[in-house]
Amino acid sequence: EVQLVESGGGLVQPGGSLRLSCAASGLSFSSSWMSWVRQAPGKGLEWVAYINKDGTENSYVDSVKGRFTISRDNTKNSLYLQMNTLRAEDTAVYYCARDRSYYGNGAFDSWGQGTMVTVSS
Amino acid sequence: QSALTQPASVSGSPGQSITISCTGTSRDVGTYNLVSWYQHHPGKAPKLMIYEGSKRPSGVSNRFSGSKSGNTASLTISGLQAEDEAHYHCCSYAGSSTLVFGGGTRLTVL
């Protein structure tokens, strides 16, 4: 059974930092493009970042470029999102998701349950 | 990276068919046949229903189908059932390993 388990969310002040983690099991992690997707309260899903299979390529939504960094450790079957200079508009549930496609095209067939990040003073 | 446009809500009676539209631009939906659709029940993880425009993952009912015309993709659910009531989100590849989602559509089964 595929499992993606996020952790690291919480309450942080504007300008602060958080590091999210996603532990994967039951899938070929090192063969999968991975992403972070978020959902702000009352809003739709928003793609945040992508990382390729070996961690050598990544991409971001414009609103987080320069502030967020996606990374992975295939030896630990883990995905990370380092979030710096957090803003109120980053408040959301953050999901870890696995892309089933070869090159990463948005076909997320496995999702975690999400971890809540609240940015507030 | 502008969000795709979906209707805020749609509704239908059990047994009917409904279609949810997802309008993008020539930079995403119009260029790539890489639209996916997700079903999302509150408090649960999203579920992939359609990928690469019209493909269904194993285990997804054939009542769900996807299509595209120009800059607009569509999800059709036939034979509506009570358990189909959920939020539905479209997502399109937008080049350079980036994605864009729609705002989501709430489906109500009357």
Image (tube, grey):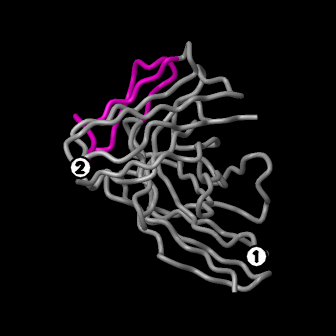
Residue in the picture at 40% in, 53% down:
A92
Q: Quadrant of residue A20?
A: top left
Whether residue A34 sits left or right of residue A27 in the image: it is left
- Do discs 1 and 2 share a chain? no
Chain letter, disc 2 residue: A
Whether residue A53 sits left or right of residue B81 in the image: it is left
Whether residue A102 sits left or right of residue A60 in the image: it is right
- Disc 2 target residue: A87
Which quadrant of the rendered structure holds the C terminus of chain B? Answer: bottom right
Q: Secondary structure at mark 1?
A: helix
Residue in the picture at 43% in, 65% down:
B103
Chain letter, disc 1 residue: B
Do residues under tags 1 and 2 come within 8 Å of each other at their CB atoms? Answer: no
Span of residues in magenta: A50-73
Magenta region includes residue A44: no
> In front: B30, or A5?
A5
Residue in the picture at 62% in, 74% down:
B19
Q: Please state the horizontal and vertical placement of residue A25, each as a whole percent of the image.
A: 67, 27
Q: Secondary structure at mark 2?
A: loop
- Disc 1 target residue: B82
> Callout 2, which amino acid?
Arg
Between disc 1 and disc 2, the foreground one is: 2
Residue in the picture at 79% in, 59% down:
B61
